[in-house]
Image (cartoon, helix red, strand yellow):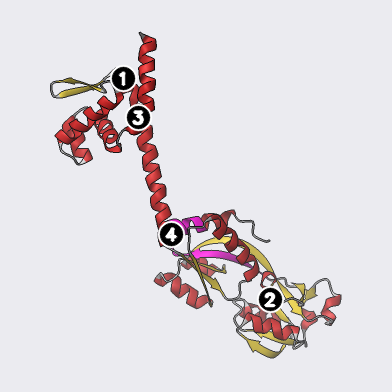
């Protein structure tokens, strides 16, 4: 007798995938309330429709899930044993729907990334390439701007996230997620006398020809230190463009201060800046209180798991 009942249950489980999800929802609601009227209200259907769906599922399974006692219903032993399986099917279906919805959102909503113009592109590009490889359904747009423009675009919702130098002011206004720290170095052309040194102290640069990076977010701080140390720099060229600064240094116009991961022009020499040493922290910046879209959530998760330099 027991063996025959177990065999019957195995047949039922083998056929369970032929059931409709609506029928499973009706049974779960009825088991929750032990009342068809309340179950129908929860499922937003009429009571006859719910009752019909429950009976159809019982017919499919080959055994009653409920015992009817007038208006009162009770779970049968069979129904009690089937309930965890039906709940599991419902949970899996819901999870599949969420995944499908998120995938559709990934394709429809791009991640709009703003990058500060002084950030080195080579290492950032490695991360972006890995991210796109692992998230083929996500569209990514990248724009480059100065600090003030990026802050305005974040506030106005024109971009979702920015890569910027982390400062106390920025941390007070926005939500920040640190990525890496990089030193400032002295860059100069080959055959320059600085190439004989392992590191360059600030006072070693006094009187040297200098290429001024006007877009550097730490420029005022470096200039202030130079003034306090009595270091005189002669700017022979000034530019807000990183490519022009590096090209003019390589052409022999003078040296420049640069973040170590921002040096991209082949042939440039560099040495760490010491006495004092200067470094910056680079972070992802987002708007506080603004909910992440599924694509942005994936982007932030990938950035936190990436092996950044430094």
Q: Identify the secondary structure beneath mark 4.
A: helix
Q: Quadrant of the N terminus?
A: top left
Write down the residue under mark 4.
107
Q: Position of residue 23 (x, y in %)?
A: 26, 34
Q: Earlier in the sequence, mark 1 or mark 4?
A: 1
Instruction: Look at the numbered discs 2 and 1 and tell me whether their residues touch, using CB distance below 8 Å.
Output: no
Write down the residue under mark 1.
78
- Picture quadrant where residue 245 is located: bottom right
Residue appearing at x 76%, y 74% in the figure? 270
**In the depicted view, which residue is nearer to us: 13 or 98?**
13
Write down the residue under mark 3.
16
Q: Position of residue 157 (x, y in %)?
A: 41, 69
Q: Is residue 279 left or right of residue 99?
A: right
Residue appearing at x 67%, y 61% in the figure? 309
Q: Identify the secondary structure beneath mark 3.
A: helix
Write down the residue under mark 2.
258
Q: Quadrant of the C terminus?
A: bottom right
Q: Identify the secondary structure beneath mark 1.
A: helix
Q: CA distance from mark 3 to mark 4?
A: 33 Å
Q: CA distance from mark 2 to mark 4?
A: 38 Å
Closer mark to the observer between disc 3 and disc 1 = 3
């Amino acid at each position: 007798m027991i063996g025959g009942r177990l065999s019957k249950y195995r047949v039922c489980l083998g056929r369970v995938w032929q059931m409709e999800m609506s029928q499973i929802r009706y049974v779960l609601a009825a088991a929750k309330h032990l009342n068809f009227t309340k179950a129908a209200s929860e499922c937003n259907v009429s009571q006859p429709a719910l009752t019909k769906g429950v009976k159809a599922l019982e017919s499919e399974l080959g055994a009653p899930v409920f015992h009817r006692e007038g208006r009162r219903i009770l779970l049968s032993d069979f129904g009690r044993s089937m309930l965890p399986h039906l709940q599991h099917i419902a949970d899996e279906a819901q999870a599949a729907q969420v995944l499908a919805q998120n995938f559709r959102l990934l394709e429809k909503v791009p991640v709009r990334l703003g990058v500060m113009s002084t950030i080195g592109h080579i290492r950032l590009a490695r991360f972006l390439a890995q991210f796109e490889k692992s998230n083929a359904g996500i569209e990514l747009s990248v724009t480059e701007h100065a600090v003030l423009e990026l802050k305005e675009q974040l506030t106005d919702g024109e971009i979702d996230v920015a890569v910027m130098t982390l400062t106390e002011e920025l941390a007070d206004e926005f939500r920040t997620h640190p990525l890496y720290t990089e030193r400032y170095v002295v860059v100069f052309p080959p055959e320059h006398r600085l190439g004989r040194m392992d590191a360059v102290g600030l006072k070693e640069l006094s009187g040297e020809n200098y290429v001024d990076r006007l877009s550097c977010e730490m420029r005022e701080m470096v200039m202030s230190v130079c003034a306090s140390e009595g270091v005189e720099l002669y700017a022979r060229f000034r530019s807000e463009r990183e490519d022009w600064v590096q090209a003019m240094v390589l052409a022999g116009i003078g040296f420049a201060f640069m973040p170590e991961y921002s040096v991209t022009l082949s042939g440039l020499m560099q040495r760490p800046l010491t006495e004092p040493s200067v470094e910056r922290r680079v972070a992802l910046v987002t708007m506080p209180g603004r909910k992440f879209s599924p694509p942005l959530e994936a982007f932030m998760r990938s950035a936190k798991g990436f092996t950044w330099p430094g």
